[in-house]
Image (cartoon, coloured by chain):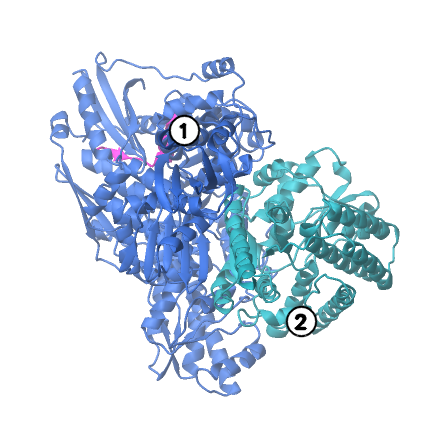
Chain colours: A cyan, B blue
């Protein structure tokens, strides 16, 4: 590998670390967590068409769309003049999997060079020791808080999705969730250590609050969203799919980001077992995964007393993919994507949009490639695969999603009629 | 009285309107809207009111463009597929499948026992009806005549079925080579059928009672016929009023939404200004600005009167993919005669007519000393009219560009089909880049789009000058642009805006997809010349200058530059007399085209043979020189692709015959792993049966099981190989998942296979019914012996019970065999390289993946390179060097070999590298940039050839010849 700009310990003090927006319910909290450990992190909020323009300008446009958006968002932010370019660093995840996403960081660096910002350090956030920086270290207390942030983000997202479509008073759900997010952001930024107990107390209070929101008794079709991780959660990547579906009168169902993290750790342990590697590393990952799985039980216990749905345990989720695809397929979202489809169907969300970047390699196999077998096992499932690309016209995507929504509504109508 | 129900279906090209009273259709109308949606709809509704006197109706709207209207005006939208299904299930019983093809979208609905599945094509495969329109225009017929032509067809060509853009890439050269229009017509329909099956069947069989819907299927019985033949349908039908059937479904779709049509008209007529941050600034602020702009771009050439001039003259003919250009110049390079026009799929007739015209006006004192041709039809024209020579178009363009701007640094050419650019350093070309298939056809897309709206190309271009709010239509390809137009129309833009938007998109496509410039001035300098017919369009020129930020030169003869360059080259190479046919001979020139299937190798190319009155003949559409039968004595240059293919065949043949057999698909990574599995299974006394080499026939047998139409061609091929193994009646098909490859060198940071190669067996398992065959697909790696034994011990139970010890032995035998194979390739590679250096041969490293040696995947590019006099090496014929440092994460074993080869050739003057990239290969988006970086660091040219199911290798030919020219 050629030389890169290192993020030094010096830089930690006064460099602002820019984080691309990937999941609105999670990332602000992650930034707050980093800040409580002495970093100056900031999630990018810039939106709009110039992001795609900048991305296409600096990234090969055969590359998949998350790279184009993430890099475009960075470059636009850098050029905006809002930051001192000599005092910023960028951070990007690197899973190290067999997909081209592991190379985003290099695309970003080359884009920075082309745009004249080759001096800006780029930090790789990875669990596989692909790259390290003296100024950026994941300590155990920090990791612990990051796990908490994901747990919180997942829950807020899921309760928001279960409440928003049914709220009686317009925007009540948005306001409440926003209030909670800002409060938690503040807590996570100002307190270095937050015990799990405290976190569960927050969550308990949050759940109580949301449960108080007045809701209608309408029956709305549930639409599940699965897919490539960026396009699945990022409104920028999926043309605001969530709000589009809510406006169409649907309830959106997505599984949490924690599952994805667990899945990546699981993949490492799998590979070590199957193809060899450091046994110790395997054990560490196993222990880490076990630690990360823990909060789900507690959260489910909190949710159980309300009208909200519990989430399936990761181990159960894992088993669901097996009739269709082996756990050795863990490139991209791998077997997890298939398992999520199955879990959604089995838990009553039979309408599912799979979102992927145009030309996404793993999704040929784990999404579209599994449709036939899934439809055989669950004939009533209603699946639509939507490609996202900076050049794809929104109207084409909308039209296909509308088809899915219409079918979903028809089904509800039929069911109501048979009930009557 | 029950309300009248009105259904309006606004598609991408047509509007359909149906009124229903009590299930009876009382009114119907089908009209093309020529992108004037609101106007047309208002007109249609007014006519409806006038003829029926009905004003209050239940109003539903559907269709891809109808969605935009519904969003804006709050009409009740019903999704079109739901309409189709509703209408069919209301009127017909026992329908199994509905196929509906529209202007842009294709839909298939499976209805069996209430388990309904509705599918629409992916974004990539859009534009069915629009594609038919384009092809008809290419053949200069209307859609109905296209259907008539197809009835007279004799043969079907294999045409790419990925999308309209790719198909056009195959059709254009066929036309130019003299293929029969009738045969093209039927091939167009077949391509649509194949595309529908690959894109929408996705493993579900289309059978039983099939209902056809939509304009193209209603109006073309030949298209229906192709569907019936291909799918072996015996019970298909089109309903009455099939062309408005979706509108009918829309009208009767349950809803309660009564509107006064006068209000609808009023709403549609309000031209509210949509505020959107999506609009781009206009290209020209005023007509004044445009005038100044035109005056500043007035780089003309001197003319002489052909009737007056006496002396020597030189002829250049540029037979492009969509246009034919001709230029006659005087001794001092002045223009005597020029022609620029569409070739209408008939370049020979056009050149003949123009030559006659030229001869007739020419002063008797003119002596034509030499004539050269260039462009796609270079060889055809040269042979037909006995020209003195031909030159590859890039070189012609360079010669012409130098004439206008002697110290030119950068030339961009946008023609009808191709875009290319080259850079010049120290008076020599330092790089040449041609667009790949995806970004092709931009120029001709604008002209066919203009024509479809009833505009001439020039008038359409002029509209852009007054455009106030252009939009970005995307840069991926013309199929995406087409759907971008639909989106734009929904935003209330007019044709002028679309014209400007297209200009901007074409330019962005060139800049960001082909040129990939981020800082144009720094990367390429400021002495820039643009040319090609597309640049006659002022809007395109302005958009280009706006993007790069400075002024460029556009010669007045922008479209004639290839021909002009050819004429200059003719002058340079002129002998005493020209061989060009004389006036009399041109007048009596006739030709006869015939189509034959070449039987000289397994490729079975569909050859077009043109016989000319001069006695010469010209064979086109061949993938190798075999049918040309000339110069048999010349020794064929060494070819590592052929060597590897032969070597693998030997491995398969050398096996003993054992009772137990296992079938392996000869596709993807098996192309490299076959030696391992032969070593492994033979040790266990099991014979390996491989599927046959890929043929089009074999591919077709598996195409209905492909679930993802955007996956790469090498992966799609796997499906045919599985069917082929079924046919061989093997009991077991063995195809392991191998996410990881071998750790070949220490500079690799990981050793993955690409995701598709790694786990494609999972996809095969889910998309095939393995009735009589068992499919064995363990997860394996060759790296870990212990795990391998553990896994295979269990898997082998399904095939033949063997001990763990036996498996260990077999594993080692396999490893040895694989190592031997790799070593053989290395040794042969070294041998070939040494020979080439000794003989001073030019060498091309064709850098791809192991499966690129499949002749159906590489389309004979290796042999083409041989025919151009070069030795062919493969990326894996170089031993791996651990010290190479890449700028990207180097984690794929196969791809590391390409980086390695790129590093290795740095020191050899006569060796260049051409990278083979499969369309849809996401990883190559990374590797191509990296290979390019490595080569350019060592002052080597980077050449990329993107391959897919397009069998036309004309553009590959131009690329490689350009490269060879630069090497000199």
For marks 1 and 2, give the CA distance: 63 Å
Find out whether the residues at labels 1 and 2 contact each other: C-beta distance under 8 Å. no
- State yes or no: residue B689 in magenta: no
In the structure shown, which secondary structural element does the residue marked by tag 2 occupy?
A: helix
Q: Is residue A271 visible?
A: no
Tag shown at residue A181: none
The residue closer to the viewer here, A367 or A163, is A163
Furthest-front residue in this view: B1
| Chain holding disc 2 | A
Tag shown at residue B46: 1
In the structure shown, which secondary structural element does the residue marked by tag 1 occupy?
A: helix
Q: Position of residue A78 (x, y in %)?
A: 70, 37
The residue closer to the viewer here, B825 or B761, is B761
State which region is magenta.
Answer: B387-400
The residue closer to the viewer here, B308 or B854, is B854
Q: Is residue B12 above or below residue A207?
A: above
Residue that mark 2 sits on: A315
Badge count? 2
Q: Is residue A333 above or below residue B613?
A: below
Taking the spot 88% from the left edge, 50% from the top edge, the residue there is A190
| Chain holding disc 1 | B
Taking the spot 50% from the left edge, 43% from the top edge, the residue there is B77
Quadrant including the N terminus of chain B: top left
In this rendering, the label closer to the viewer, 1 or 2: 1
């Amino acid at each position: 590998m050629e030389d890169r700009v290192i993020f030094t310990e010096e830089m930690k003090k006064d460099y602002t670390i820019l984080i691309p927006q990937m999941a609105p319910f999670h990332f602000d909290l992650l930034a707050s967590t980093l800040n409580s450990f002495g970093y100056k992190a900031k999630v990018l909020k810039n939106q709009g068409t110039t992001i795609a323009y900048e991305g296409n300008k600096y990234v090969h446009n055969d590359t998949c769309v998350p790279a184009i958006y993430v890099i475009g968002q960075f470059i636009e932010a850098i050029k905006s003049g809002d930051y001192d370019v000599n005092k910023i660093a960028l951070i990007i995840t690197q899973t190290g999997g067999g997909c081209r996403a592991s190379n985003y960081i290099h695309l970003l660096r080359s884009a920075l060079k082309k745009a004249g910002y080759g001096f800006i350090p780029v930090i790789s956030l990875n669990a596989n020791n692909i790259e390290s920086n003296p100024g950026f270290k994941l300590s155990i207390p920090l990791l612990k808080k990051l796990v908490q942030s994901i747990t919180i983000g997942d829950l807020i997202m899921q309760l928001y999705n279960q409440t928003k479509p049914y709220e009686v008073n317009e925007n009540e759900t948005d306001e409440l969730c926003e209030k909670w997010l800002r409060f938690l952001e503040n807590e996570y930024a100002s307190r270095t250590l937050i015990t799990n107990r405290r976190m569960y107390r927050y969550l308990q209070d949050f759940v109580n609050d949301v449960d108080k929101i007045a809701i209608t008794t309408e029956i709305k079709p549930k639409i599940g969203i699965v897919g490539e991780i960026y396009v699945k959660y990022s409104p920028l990547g999926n043309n605001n799919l969530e709000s589009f579906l809510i406006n169409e009168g649907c309830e959106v169902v997505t599984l949490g980001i924690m599952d994805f993290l667990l899945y990546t750790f699981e993949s490492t342990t799998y590979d070590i077992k199957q193809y060899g590697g450091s046994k110790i590393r395997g054990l560490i990952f196993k222990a880490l995964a076990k630690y990360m799985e823990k909060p789900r039980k507690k959260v489910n216990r909190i949710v159980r007393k309300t009208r909200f749905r519990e989430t399936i345990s990761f181990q159960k989720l894992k088993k669901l993919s097996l009739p269709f695809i082996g756990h050795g397929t863990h490139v991209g979202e791998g077997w997890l994507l298939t398992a999520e489809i199955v879990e959604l169907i089995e838990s009553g969300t039979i309408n599912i949009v799979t979102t992927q970047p145009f030309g996404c390699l793993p999704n040929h196999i784990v999404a579209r490639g599994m449709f036939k077998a899934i439809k055989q096992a669950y004939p009533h499932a209603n699946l639509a695969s939507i490609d996202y690309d900076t050049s794809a016209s929104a109207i084409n995507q909308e039209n296909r999603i509308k088809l899915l929504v219409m079918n979903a509504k028809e089904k509800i109508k039929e069911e109501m009629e048979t009930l009557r | 009285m029950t309300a009248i129900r009105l259904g309006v279906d606004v598609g991408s090209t047509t509007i359909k309107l149906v009124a229903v009273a009590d299930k009876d259709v009382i009114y119907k109308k089908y009209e093309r809207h020529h992108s004037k949606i609101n106007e047309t709809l208002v007109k249609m509704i007014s006519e409806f009111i006038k003829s029926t006197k009905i004003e209050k109706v239940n109003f539903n709207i559907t269709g891809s463009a109808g969605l935009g209207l519904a969003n804006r005006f709050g009409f009740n939208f019903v999704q079109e597929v739901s309409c189709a299904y509703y209408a069919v299930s209301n009127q017909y019983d026992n329908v199994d499948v509905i196929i509906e093809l529209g202007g842009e979208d294709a839909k298939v609905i499976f209805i069996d026992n209430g388990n309904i599945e509705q599918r629409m094509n992916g974004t990539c495969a859009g534009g069915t009806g629009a594609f038919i329109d384009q092809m008809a225009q290419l053949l200069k017929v209307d859609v109905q005549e296209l259907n008539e032509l197809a009835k007279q067809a004799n043969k079907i060509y294999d045409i790419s079925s990925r999308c309209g853009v790719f198909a056009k890439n195959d059709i254009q050269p066929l036309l130019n080579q003299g293929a029969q229009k009738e045969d093209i017509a039927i091939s167009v329909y077949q391509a649509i059928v194949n595309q529908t099956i690959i894109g929408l069947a996705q493993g579900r069989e289309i059978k039983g009672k099939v209902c056809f819907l939509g304009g193209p299927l209603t109006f073309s019985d030949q298209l229906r016929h192709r569907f019936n033949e291909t799918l072996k349908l015996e019970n298909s039908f089109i309903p009455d009023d099939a062309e408005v059937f979706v509108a009918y479904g829309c009208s009767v779709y349950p809803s309660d939404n009564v509107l006064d049509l006068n209000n609808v008209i009023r709403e549609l007529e309000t031209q509210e200004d949509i505020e959107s941050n999506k609009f781009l600034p206009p290209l020209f602020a005023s007509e004044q600005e445009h005038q100044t702009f035109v005056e500043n771009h007035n780089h003309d050439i001197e003319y002489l009167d052909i009737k007056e001039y006496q002396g020597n003259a030189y002829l250049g003919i540029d037979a492009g993919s969509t246009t034919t250009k001709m230029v006659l110049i005087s001794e001092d390079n002045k223009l005597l005669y020029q022609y620029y026009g569409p070739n209408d799929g008939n370049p020979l007739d056009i050149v003949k007519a123009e030559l006659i015209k030229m001869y007739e006006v020419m002063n008797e004192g003119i002596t034509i000393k030499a004539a050269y041709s260039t462009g796609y039809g270079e060889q055809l024209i040269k042979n037909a009219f006995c020209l003195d020579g031909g030159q590859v178009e890039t070189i012609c363009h360079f010669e012409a560009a130098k004439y206008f701007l002697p110290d030119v640094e950068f030339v961009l050419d946008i023609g009808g089909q191709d875009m290319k650019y080259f850079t010049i350093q120290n008076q020599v070309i330092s790089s040449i880049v041609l667009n790949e298939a995806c970004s092709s056809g931009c120029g001709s897309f604008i002209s066919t789009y203009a024509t479809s709206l009833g505009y001439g190309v020039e008038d359409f271009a002029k509209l852009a000058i007054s455009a106030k709010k252009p939009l970005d239509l995307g840069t991926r390809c013309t199929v995406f642009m087409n759907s971008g137009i639909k989106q734009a129309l929904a935003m209330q833009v007019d044709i002028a805006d679309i014209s400007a938007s297209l200009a901007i998109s074409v330019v962005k496509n060139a800049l960001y997809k082909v040129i990939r410039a981020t800082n144009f001035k720094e990367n390429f300098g400021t002495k820039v010349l643009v040319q090609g017919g597309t640049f006659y369009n002022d809007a395109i020129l302005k958009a280009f200058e706006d993007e790069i930020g400075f002024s460029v030169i556009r010669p007045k003869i922008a479209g004639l530059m290839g021909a002009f360059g050819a004429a200059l080259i003719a002058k340079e190479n002129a002998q005493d007399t020209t061989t060009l046919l004389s006036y009399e001979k041109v007048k009596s020139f006739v030709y006869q085209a015939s189509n034959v299937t070449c039987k000289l190798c397994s490729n079975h190319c569909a050859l077009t043979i043109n016989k000319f009155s001069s006695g010469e003949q010209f064979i086109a559409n061949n993938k190798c020189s075999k049918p040309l039968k000339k110069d048999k004595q010349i020794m064929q240059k060494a070819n590592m692709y052929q060597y590897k293919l032969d070597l693998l065949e030997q491995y398969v043949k050398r096996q003993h015959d054992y009772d137990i057999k296992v079938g392996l698909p000869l596709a993807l990574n098996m192309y490299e792993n076959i030696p391992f599995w032969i070593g492994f299974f033979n040790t266990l006394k099991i014979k390996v049966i491989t599927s046959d080499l890929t043929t089009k026939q074999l591919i077709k047998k598996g195409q209905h099981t492909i679930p993802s139409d955007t996956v790469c061609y090498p992966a799609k091929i796997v499906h045919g190989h599985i069917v082929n193994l079924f046919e061989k009646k093997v009991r077991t098909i063995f195809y392991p998942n191998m996410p990881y490859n071998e750790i070949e060198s220490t500079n690799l940071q990981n050793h993955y296979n690409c995701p598709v190669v790694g786990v494609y067996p999972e996809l095969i398992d889910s998309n095939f019914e393995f009735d009589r065959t068992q499919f064995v697909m363990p997860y394996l790696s060759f790296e870990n012996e212990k795990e391998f034994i553990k896994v295979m011990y269990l898997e082998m139970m399904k095939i033949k019970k063997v001990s763990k010890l036996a498996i260990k032995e077999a594993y080692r035998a396999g490893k040895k065999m694989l190592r031997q194979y790799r070593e053989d390739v290395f040794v042969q590679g070294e041998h070939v390289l040494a020979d080439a250096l000794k003989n001073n041969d030019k060498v091309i490293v064709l850098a791809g993946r192991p499966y690129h040696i499949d002749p159906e995947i590489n389309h004979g590019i290796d042999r083409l390179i041989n025919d151009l006099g070069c030795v062919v090496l493969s990326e894996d014929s170089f031993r791996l060097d651990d010290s190479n440092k890449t700028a990207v994460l180097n984690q794929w074993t196969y791809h590391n070999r390409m980086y390695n080869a790129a590093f290795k050739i740095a020191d050899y003057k006569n060796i260049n590298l051409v990278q083979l990239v499969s369309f849809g290969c996401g990883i190559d988006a990374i590797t191509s940039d990296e290979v390019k970086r490595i080569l350019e660091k060592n002052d080597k040219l980077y050449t990329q050839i993107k391959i897919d199911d397009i069998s036309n290798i004309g553009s590959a030919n131009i690329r490689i010849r350009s490269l060879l020219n630069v090497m000199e």
